[in-house]
Image (tube, rainbow, N blue to C red):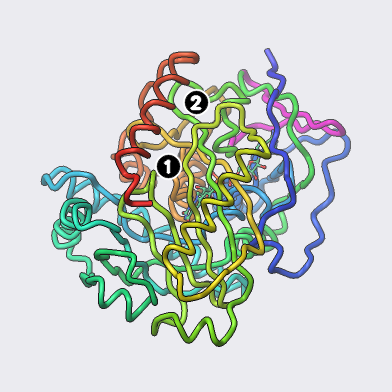
Amino acid sequence: MPRFIDRLPADDNTNGWSALLPMRQPRLSLQGDLAVDWVIVGAGYAGVAAARQLARRHPDSSIAVVEAGVVGENASGRNSGFAIDLPHTPGVSPEATELGRRAIRVGHFALDELDSLVQQHNIDCDWERRGRYHAAVTDEVANQALRTYAVNLDAWQEPYQWMDRKQLQDRLGTDYYSAAIYTPGTYLLNPAGLIRGLADSLPEQVKLYENSAVIEAELHGESPYICTDQGRICARKVILAVNAFSQSFGVYRECQVPILLFASLTPVLSDAQLAHLGSDATWGVTPAQSIPGSTLRLTRDKRLMIRQGFEYSPKLRTTDARRARAKAMNRELLLSRFPQLGDIGLEHFWMGWLAISRNHAPAFGQIAENTYAVSCCNGSGIVRHTAAGMLIADLALGYQNPLIDDFLSQGMASYIPPRPLRDIGARLSLMWEMWRGRTEQ
Ligand SMILES: Cc1cc2nc3c(=O)[nH]c(=O)nc-3n(C[C@H](O)[C@H](O)[C@H](O)COP(=O)(O)OP(=O)(O)OC[C@H]3O[C@@H](n4cnc5c(N)ncnc54)[C@H](O)[C@@H]3O)c2cc1C
């Protein structure tokens, strides 16, 4: 039975990252009927990586990528722009250390791929290996979460530096944080620039269709197909790479929830304001507690970026009132870190959806005879979903890639009861996390 897709992405034209880039002409939308070897739904990091990997392995196959909106305007282009090399494992057991090592192998595989594509295609996205400060606001969280992280880093033999409040003040220009762990391997970037560049450099045999929302899909049986309002593609195989929107396709509904995040960029800071910041020319801070915490950056063009808010969003929609509250909170949290900058405004404010699982594991694999799906980025999809896209392509081709086992060593996204129980559970547990970590905002 075909499925009619009830919830489609809707671009609100607010993405701050793409506003900083030159205009880009989207590819033509799908028109008419086609038959191809592979159709991939979704042109985010996962879909684009899957398409490139299929083309690399089988240069003669025909591949179509169908994207509801414009490349760079959905989560892949709206995120905070941290391509993170290292995982977070909650425990310090030998098993956790080994899982971490396997996640690091997968991360390096994807980061090396991204780094070489950025160089090879001159992708203009401010791609820079700046590392990141993983920071705690309070002494209590520094002494728990950061100390645990340090034990893991020692076990993995990964380099890091412990930074105290004074050192952070010198480097970043704020005394807001109690401490941070600096690791050097993270790349900072403009995410809209990166995903545009990756999509625009896909090999010839990959045809990308933008502004082509899939509104009907048959993902089961021998002859899967997808339909947009003006076209239809029959394919030998389908890869679904729509992350938070998987539930609309009836896929991975039982193991992931959509989460809404908010982010802002200030105008370019003046020289006088920059003189009040620290010695690092650009930097990125991730929160030791990811749900209540804020992600911050000083971008290469000297704007501050903040990402805050973590909200259960089953309908993949929000209200103007909620956006206004989130925007005010973004601004307040920036001012509390940098009171010396005066009344900094926000030039851009936007939001985006991602998918998380209860156990932080991915949703990945074959879901029907000729259909594969990847979802549940758990908030770090630049690297993780680049890997997932490449690996789902290898899995679908039957290509023995040992990294598939490494990727799946984290397990599969675990069961979450259906609505309305899920609504109650997800809301309560996020409220609890927010309340518990309120001093880490
Ligand atoms: C504010 C914010 C900050 C974040 N910060 C970071 C960060 O710093 N680092 C990091 O690694 N990750 C971060 N993330 C998460 C990251 O953006 C995601 O993990 C990543 O985008 C997942 O990639 P994806 O390709 O799986 O999904 P997506 O980027 O969501 O791409 C899925 C695509 O599917 C398309 N689609 C959906 N439905 C249909 C349909 N019916 N027909 C056709 N196409 C459809 C969508 O339009 C979309 O383009 C952040 C996310 C947000 C929202």
Q: Position of residue 67 (x, y in %)?
A: 71, 43
Front residue of this view, candidates 249 and 432: 432
- Left or right of 8? Residue 292 is left
Q: Position of residue 208 (x, y in %)?
A: 74, 49
- Give the magenta-colored segment's residue range: 221-240
In the figure, 4 relative to 262: above or below?
A: above
| Magenta-drawn stretch, dominant element (helix, strand or loop) | strand
Furthest residue in direction left, as rendered: 94
Q: Name the residue tied to disc 2.
A: 252
- Rendered residue at 48%/64% (across/down): 335
Q: What type is the residue that disc 1 sits on?
A: Asn
Magenta includes 32?
A: no
* Residue 431 visible in the current orientation: yes
Q: Position of residue 203 (x, y in %)?
A: 67, 59
Magenta includes 239?
A: yes
The numbered mark at residue 104 is: none
Front residue of this view, candidates 419 and 50: 419
Bin the neighbour count of mark 1 within 10 Å (Cα to Cα): few under 14, some 14-19, many 20 and up: many
- SS of the residue under disc 1: loop
- Left or right of 145? Residue 218 is right
Front residue of this view, candidates 73 and 270: 270
Q: Name the residue tied to disc 1.
A: 378
- Left or right of 380? Residue 14 is right
> Is the C-beta separation of discs 1 and 2 under 8 Å?
no
Indicate if the residue with disc 1 has its beta carbon within 8 Å of ligand 1.
yes
In the figure, 118 relative to 225: above or below?
A: below
- SS of the residue under disc 2: loop
Indicate if the residue with disc 2 has its beta carbon within 8 Å of ligand 1.
no
Looking at the rendering, in which quadrant would you find the N terminus? top right
- Rendered residue at 25%/56% (across/down): 138
Q: What type is the residue that disc 2 sits on?
A: Tyr
Q: Position of residue 438 (x, y in %)?
A: 35, 45
